[in-house]
Every structure is written in C-alpha cells, then in structure tokens.
Amino acid sequence: MRTDTVRTCNVRGGCHLANGTESVPPERTNPNGGRFSAARLSGPHRICPLALLDGANSVRWHYGLMDPVAEMLLSEAAPLGSHVLVVDDVDGAVTRAVAAAGSAVSAYCDDARERAALGAAAVPELRPEVIAVVDQVLVRLPKSAGALDELSELVAGHGGVDVRLVGAGRVKHMSRAMNASLARSFTDVRASLGRSKCRALHASGPRHPQPTWPRRGYIEALDLHVVAHGGVFAGTRLDAGTRLLLANLPVAPGGVAIDVGSGSGIIATWLARRGDRVTAIDVSAAAVRSTAATAAANGVLVSTHLADGLTDIAPASADVIVTNPPFHDGAAKQTGPTAGIFAAAGRVLRPGGQLWTVFNSHLPYLSWLRRDVGPTRVVAQDRSYTVTRSTARSG
Ligand SMILES: C[S@@+](CC[C@H](N)C(=O)[O-])C[C@H]1O[C@@H](n2cnc3c(N)ncnc32)[C@H](O)[C@@H]1O
C-alpha cells in the first residue's frame, strides 16, 4: 500500500506527490490483492486514487478497489479522528483505508456474510462501550430508515459530545426519512453535494435521545407480541405472506423445526408455541436479536442462529422447515438466497420431512421446490401469494 505524502489531490486523481512525481496510474496496483472480491460488489467499481486526511491532517495516498459509496464516505470523512467506527462496510474497503490513514478502527456489519471482510477490526455487537470511544462513525446508509434511526439513537446516546456520524449511499436508495432520523438524534444535520449518483449525510451534536429501539407491537390476529430492531423485515407488523402461511400450517406440533429467514421471529415463535423445538436462522444480526426478543416476549424457547441460510445445519436433522424466504439482498431484489435455501432444505430435512413456504405467485419457485426438495403441493393461494408444502425425498 502506498502511503506517500501528497501535496495536492482530489478524489478523481490528478494528485502530485510531495516528491514532485505524478500519481501512479490507478490501474497499476491493487494492494489489497486477493482480499477484494470484485464479484461481491454491486454497481460500477474502479481502482481509484483516494485522498484521506488522517488525524494530523496530513494527506495520505491510498489505492484500493472502491465502489462510489465507499469513495464518497472516505472523501467526506476528514478529519478522521483517532478512533473510527465503520458500519456496514460490505467489502471492508473503508475499514482498511481508515486503518491505512493511521486511525484506530472498529467495524461492524449487520449481515453475517459481510463480517469476514472486516478482519481484526470486527466487533460482534454495537455495544455502548464500542460507541463511547469513537470520534466518528462512518456508515454505508442502510436501505431502511429504521436501521439508520436505531444507529443514530445509539451513537447520539452513547457517543461523546464531539462524536460525528457520516453516512453515504446511492441517491436512489436515500429518503427524507433518513435526514429526519438523524435530526431526531443530532442537532446539526446536512447533506453533501451529490457525486457519482451518491450523497453523504453529516450529523453532529448528539441530543442524547431517550432510547426508542427496539420497537414493540402486538398482533391481535395471532395474539402474539413482536419486538423489532431497526431494518427488520415488516417491523412489528405481520406481513401478508406470513399471515397466509401461518393460517395454513397444521396446529399439531411438527417436531424439530427451523424458521429460516426469521426476521422479527413471528414464525419461529408461532412454531414454538405449537410445541416444536425451534431453531431460527437469519443472516441479519438485527433480525436474530429481534427473533430472540420476540420469543422471550411470548414466553417460548427459540434457539437463534446468525448464519447464511441452512449452510451450518446437519443433514437430515429437521422434521419441518418453515420460511417466508428473502426476496431482497440489501437494496436489490434477488432470488439467489432463496434458491440456496431451497437447495439446502432438501439436504437438511429428514426423508419425509416438510418444507412450508410462501412466495409471490409470479416467482418460479414451484418448479425449484419440486426439483430441489420433492413433491410439492399448493396449499393456499390469494391474489398475491402462494403457500406450498414440499415433502423431502428419501435418500
Ligand atoms: C421476507 S423476510 C421474512 C421475515 C419473517 N420470517 C417474517 O415472516 O416476517 C426474509 C428474511 O430472510 C432474511 N435473509 C435474507 N437472506 C438470508 C440468508 N441468506 N440467510 C438467512 N436469512 C436471510 C432477511 O434478513 C429477512 O429477515
């Protein structure tokens, strides 16, 4: 990694090193080598020169494979301060750049799949003591305003008086609600100019708000209490697909059950209440914490697991899998994670075990279920959703 001091520079390039030489053409080097996986990144990326101001306001030169959001985040971050917390840094590029600039760095990702990229900087939870020691929080803006609202509340509630939060995202994924969330927790909120279809939001002056997260609700139709952290699917509401799925599940206990993609934990709690021994899995840490809190609020036992689908689950270990499967990956609509869950369900179910699922009727899932799990029946259908039951083949 180059750390030559530069005299002048801008994020687009045209930098002049202090020794009088021109900047190295960006294509020449990627110091992060194999640690970057361009395939994991979405959108246009390039190897770009990046100006970083470190705590001493000297400028360092860093080359890395950056997507425009990471680039925007870093270019808006100066001065970094002595300890930076980076949140949802999907490929670890911001974390590495901050470390290269000489600041201490802690990093947290809600999505379990993205944690490996954070290396030694990773913290398992955003605990108050993690927030208390940082000067600045850099966050890739989440899709949901709720997730930003909870993060803002946490930072403004536990950070020092000088703590700053900078968030960056693609303009098409940003909303006014994000400014409102920040303004609820900070006295000063401003937006940067847009660049490469991205924008940054700056917040400072913590108001030390009263905690309002996680949110609590009650679903009368199910007589069930729900606890939801920010960003969790459907919040404290009952999703229409989940409602149709639960209305068609047998009320007799099913045995060893898995709710994969558990979100706020409504399905897992419902299964535990009917007498199943339930494991709830979600790739989002906020969802896992919500599921555990929902189960506790209803006085049932659910074992929770932060993981990517059914990858860690032993073969032929479950009698029943119930899922309202994911249809988003971050801000993008994707069927890949669901395809993975269906393929693994055929392995994880004991022969004769059942996979119950619900999906938007236009999706091609029926043929996938028949191919990957076994004979599949449509149990219910309404104007939007289809509920199916698949029986795992023997052997
Ligand atoms: C449609 S929501 C359903 C949530 C909840 N079961 C309900 O019915 O309200 C899908 C859930 O799958 C989770 N998810 C997405 N990709 C996943 C993956 N690869 N492995 C496990 N969970 C995943 C999401 O975080 C989300 O909570």
Image (cartoon, rainbow, N blue to C red):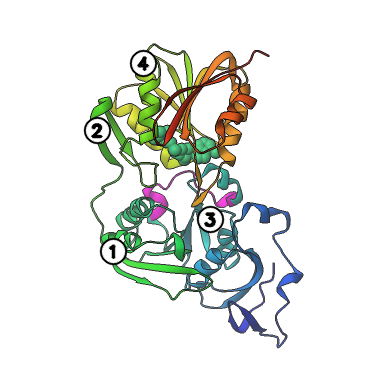
Beta carbon at label 2 within 8 Å of ligand 1:
no
Q: How would you rate the neighbour count of disc 2 (Cα within 10 Å): few for under 14, some for 14-19, many for 20 or more?
A: some
Residue found at x 43% / y 33%: 385
Is 139 situated above or below 374?
below
- Counting residues from the start of the chain, the first of labels 2 and 1 encountered is 1
Question: Can the viewer see residue 283?
Answer: no
Q: CA distance from mark 3 to mark 2?
A: 34 Å
Give the extent of the magenta segment: 118-131
Residue type pointed to by label 2: Tyr
Residue found at x 34% / y 56%: 152
Q: Which mark's residue is nearer the viewer, 2 or 1? A: 2
The secondary element bearing badge 4 is classed as helix
Percent across and percent down for residue 386 are 45, 30
- Counting residues from the start of the chain, the first of labels 3 and 4 encountered is 3
Is 382 situated above or below 94?
above
Q: Check the picture and name the quadrant holding the C terminus.
A: top right
Q: CA distance from mark 2 to mark 1?
A: 28 Å
Beta carbon at label 1 within 8 Å of ligand 1:
no
Residue annotated with mark 2: 218
Percent across and percent down for residue 287 are 42, 39
Q: How would you rate the neighbour count of disc 1 (Cα within 10 Å): few for under 14, some for 14-19, many for 20 or more?
A: many
Q: Are marks 2 and 4 in contact (CB under 8 Å)?
A: no
Beta carbon at label 3 within 8 Å of ligand 1:
no
Q: Is residue 177 magenta?
A: no
Q: CA distance from mark 3 to mark 4?
A: 40 Å
Residue annotated with mark 3: 89
The secondary element bearing badge 1 is classed as helix
Residue annotated with mark 1: 183
